[in-house]
Amino acid sequence: MTALAWLAAGWATTFLTLCSLALLDRVPHPWVPDDASPLAGLAAVPMSWCLVVVASLVLGALAVAARRPAARRPAGRALVAVGLGVVLVIADVRALAFLGYLPMLVLALVGVGPAAGHLDAGLVVDSAAALAHAIGGMAVVATGVRLLGRPSWGRWTRWGPRAVAVAIVVPLLYAATRIAWALDIPLGVRREMLDELGSARYAGLGLALFAVVGALLTWGLQARWGEVFWTWLPRYGGRPVPVALALVPGLLVAGAVSAAGISFWRMLLAGDIAEVPGATSDWAAWAPELLWPLWGAALAVGCLAYLGRRRAVTGDRRGTGGVTDPGRVLS
C-alpha cells in the first residue's frame, strides 16, 4: 500500500470506530453537519450511520483491491466516487475555515491577535474534523485513481493556463472585499454592517491574505519557479520541485474550496443566505463564495495540467515516457 492508501484506510478506520462507538452510546457522536453543510438536514445519529457505511465501503474496496488484482479497476472506480462524495458533501465550509484561520488560531494560543481569549474549542474541533474529512476524501480519491491504471495526464496540459488564470482571479476577487473592509472601505456591504463587524473584519483580512498567498502559489503551477527552485535558495536552489509538493496541497485546497462553495450554494437555494453576517443586500458577504466551486474545479485542472507537464519533462529527460503512475507521484 502507498502512503495515500494508508492515509485513506486510517481515515476510514478512525471514523468507523468512533461512529460505531457513538451508536453504542460509548462516546459522543464525532461529526454533526453544519447548518451550511449539504447534509444539514441530518442529525447526529443518521450522520454516524452515514459515516459507518462510507468508511466500510472504503475499507472494503481497499481489501478487495489488495486481494484480487482483477478487481482493482472496479475498486478504483468505487473509491473515486466515494472519495469525491466525502470531499464535496461530507466535508463542508469548516474545512476551508480551519485552513484559513490556522495562523490566527496559532497566534491566539500565545495570546496574540483578535482571536486571543475568544477561541471556541468545540468550533475548532469541528473545523479540524471537517479538514480531516477533506484530507481523507482526497486520499481515497487518489488511491482510487492509482488503482484505475495509468491515464494520460498530458491531455490536461492544454487547459492549464486558462484553469490557472481562473484559479488566481476568483480568490483575488474574494480577497479584495475583505482587504477593503480591513481598510474601513464598505465594498459591497452597508456601512452599518462594517461597523457591526468591528474587530472581526481583521479575521476576514487573515482569510484574504491566505487567498492572496494561495493565488501566488497557484501561479507556480504554470511558472518556471513552480518546477525548479530559485537558484538563490540555500541547499535546494536549482533543484527540481518535488511534484507532490505542489500537487498534494493544491488538490487539498481544491477539494476544500469546492466543499465550501457548495455549502454557500445550499444556503442560497434553501433561502438561508440571510444567516451569513449582514443582510442579503450585503452581497460581498456571500457572493464571492458562490464562485468557489469554479475556483476548486479550475485549481484541480491546473494541478492535473502541472502533473502532465512535469511527467512529459521527466519522460523527455529519461527517455522512458515519464512517471506514468500517479500513485508514485502522490505517495
Image: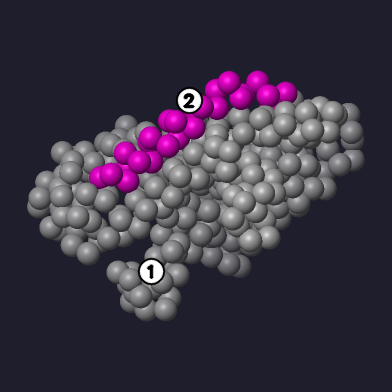
Q: Which residue is labeled 1 in the image?
A: 120
Instruction: Using the image as rendered, state which of residue 132 and residue 249 is in the foreground.
Output: 249
Please determine whether, in this image, residue 86 is positioned above or below residue 308.
below
Colouring style: one colour
Across and down, in percent, residue 92 comes to 46, 46
* Range of magenta residues: 152-177
Spatial CA span between label 1 and label 2: 40 Å
The residue at the far bottom in this view is 111
Across and down, in percent, residue 124 comes to 44, 64
Q: Main secondary structure of the magenta part?
A: helix
Instruction: Using the image as rendered, state which of residue 53 and residue 115 is in the foreground.
Output: 115
Across and down, in percent, residue 72 comes to 82, 32
The disc placed on residue 7 is none
Three-letter amino acid code at the position of disc 1: Asp
Please determine whether, in this image, residue 146 is positioned above or below residue 153.
below
Q: Is residue 172 magenta?
A: yes
Across and down, in percent, residue 232 comes to 59, 55
Instruction: Using the image as rendered, state which of residue 121 and residue 135 is in the foreground.
Output: 135
Which structural element holds mark 2?
Answer: helix
Give left or right: position of 106 versus 250: left
Which structural element holds mark 1?
Answer: loop
Residue drawn at point x = 59 percent, y = 50 percent:
230
> Sequence-wise, which precedes: disc 1 or disc 2?
1
Please determine whether, in this image, residue 142 is positioned above or below residue 106.
above
Residue drawn at point x = 49 percent, y = 32 percent:
164
Dividing the picture into quarters, in which one does residue 187 lie? Answer: top left
Q: Which residue is labeled 2 in the image?
A: 162
Give left or right: position of 105 versus 268: right
Q: Which of marks 1 and 2 is in front?
A: 2
Three-letter amino acid code at the position of disc 2: Arg
